[in-house]
Amino acid sequence: MGRDKDDNTEIDSVVPWMRAPVDVSNVENCALETLPCLNPKLKKALENMGISSLFPVQVAVWHETIGPGGFERDICVNSPTGSGKTLSYALPIVQILASRPVRCLRALVVLPTRDLALQVKDVFDAIAPVVGLSVGSAVGQSSIAGEIAQLIKTPKLDAGICYDPEDLSQNLESAVDILVATPGRLMDHINNTKGFTLEHLRYLVVDETDRLLREAYQSWLPTVLQLTQTSDDGLFPSFTPFVPSAFGSLRTVRRQSVERGFKGKPYPRLVKMVLSATLTQDPSKLIQLDLHHPLFMTTGGSRYRLPEKLECLRLICETGMKPVYLVALLKSWEGEKCIIFTSSVETTRRLCKLLNFFGDPKIKAKEYSGGLNQSVRSKELKAFRKGDIQVLVASDALTRGMDVKGVTNVINYDMPPFAKTFIHRAGRTARAGQAGRCFTLLSNHEVRRFSKLLKKVGSDSCPIYPIPPTSLDSIRATYTPALEKLKELVESEAPKKGRQAFRHNSRTGNSQTKLNKPRSEA
Ligand SMILES: Nc1ncnc2c1ncn2[C@@H]1O[C@H](COP(=O)(O)OP(=O)(O)OP(=O)(O)O)[C@@H](O)[C@H]1O
């Protein structure tokens, strides 16, 4: 297994501007009544969402954007999972855009996955329309034609008159002020959609930054930066010819949305906000963002921080008996929502089947992984949100950002490969100040490696969770037939190679964990 280069805890290797951060842990919650300058319509919308005060990271960002900071610097936020980062950028962007009612694409939010993008769109949808702003998504949920119809306003045509298509394309306008996108679909629109332009863009949010910077995703970031570049003197847009598209060169003519630059100098620039619970400190990655006098906001002095009310626990399992321990845990909860993380798509699928083969009516599991097609994934997630499913077995496709209310327990069925993976998996519970527990199932040989990982994530306590031997014994009896059923299923499905692997793993007692190489965030 490779090492994540960015997975170290060395704080002295960081870029200079990260060495003097704003410490969000010194900031208090702020009641909406006392939040300076908050648009009354937005206040009402927040109250309708059940929000009566802003969380510390939201208050800190508010001060640097709407408050005295005045968006003069680009903002980099490293704040724990579930601390409310989405609203920390959505609220100031919506408040500022609402002050100038012109319909054009002025804010772009990019996220790595479709489900995550739709979740963030929901937050914008809850606050933007009340101040007259329109929010769109480019995530591949509908056909490209459907998306274009949602994003681009076509002029009304008079009946009986012939129009030149070229003239018409000149008159196309954005139907949205804010766009939430995944990189792939964003690039589709940049390259192919008539009337889609970033020339008016004022705000670019890169959420889950370290995840997005890890892969090129069709060079979406350099493309967006180039399309929104202004010349050095700030007076004229740069006319660098760009990759040719179906509609000619992608040149940008960014409008003169004059803003204050650093130290009050007025000039047009694209404001960037980048956020993560595990923000990268790798200079070679950060440089790609071309940040403008970045202001670093973090929580506490350590690199990573777990949510305050998260309890970490571990179970040391007998070889080959992990499923038995898992079922014992699940049986003890009854009805509490739980996510079980595995190391690969294949393990996710097989573990989910195996759990259902136990035949316990209280344990009905569904799977969520990159191995399923997107519509099935989204359907299972919806059912889990609604509470129709209590147990979701997931690959690391669900690790980042997903916000499901009422998840009280997370289980690492397979030990997370990196500290970052632990942070994001565990962070699916204990969100928004709520309590939650993260269990990690370990074999004896994993104990040392897990202790090292815990040090990295700053957890000083992870006691052993005791499972009474009697409850294990009763489950052992149902384990063998369940495993037999799984074996039959695998043999009926798998090609020869897969069968051999399964037999081998059954003999060695690792039927669930060693069938596939772990794939990060599959
Ligand atoms: N001011 C607030 N008051 C109450 N609940 C809030 C507030 N702000 C956000 N929340 C809730 O907190 C939860 C977590 O918010 P959000 O998803 O933005 O966290 P995050 O910091 O982006 O987490 P992650 O790093 O896992 O993506 C959401 O359910 C959201 O509705």
Image (cartoon, rainbow, N blue to C red):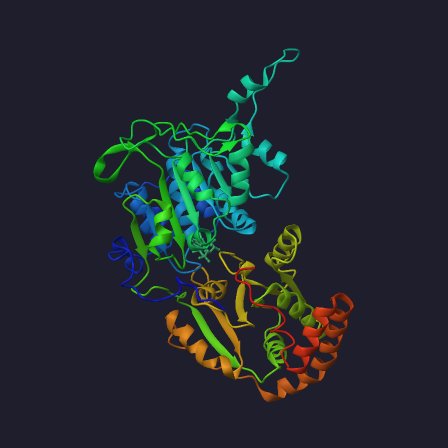
Query: Which quarter of the picture shows residue 471?
Result: bottom right
Instruction: Where is residue 29? Give x, y as percent.
Output: 34, 55
Residue at image x 54%, y 81%?
Answer: 443
Regarding residue 171, the answer to whether it shows in the image is no
Is 499 left, or right, of 285 in this rendering?
Answer: right
- Residue 197, compared with residue 76, is above or below; it is above
Residue at the extreme top: 161
Instruction: Where is residue 429? Give x, y as percent.
Output: 49, 64
Instruction: Where is residue 305? Give x, y as percent.
Output: 37, 65
- In front: 488, or 377? 488
Residue at image x 52%, y 80%?
Answer: 315
Instruction: Where is residue 272? Give x, y as percent.
Output: 36, 43
Is 507 left, or right, of 288 in this rendering?
Answer: right
Count numbered badges in the picture.
Answer: 0
- In front: 430, or 265? 265
Residue at the extreme left: 263
Residue at image x 59%, y 57%?
Answer: 385
- Residue 292, compared with residue 210, is above or below; it is above
- Residue 226, compared with residue 422, is above or below; it is above
Determine the quadrant in which ligand 1 lies.
bottom left
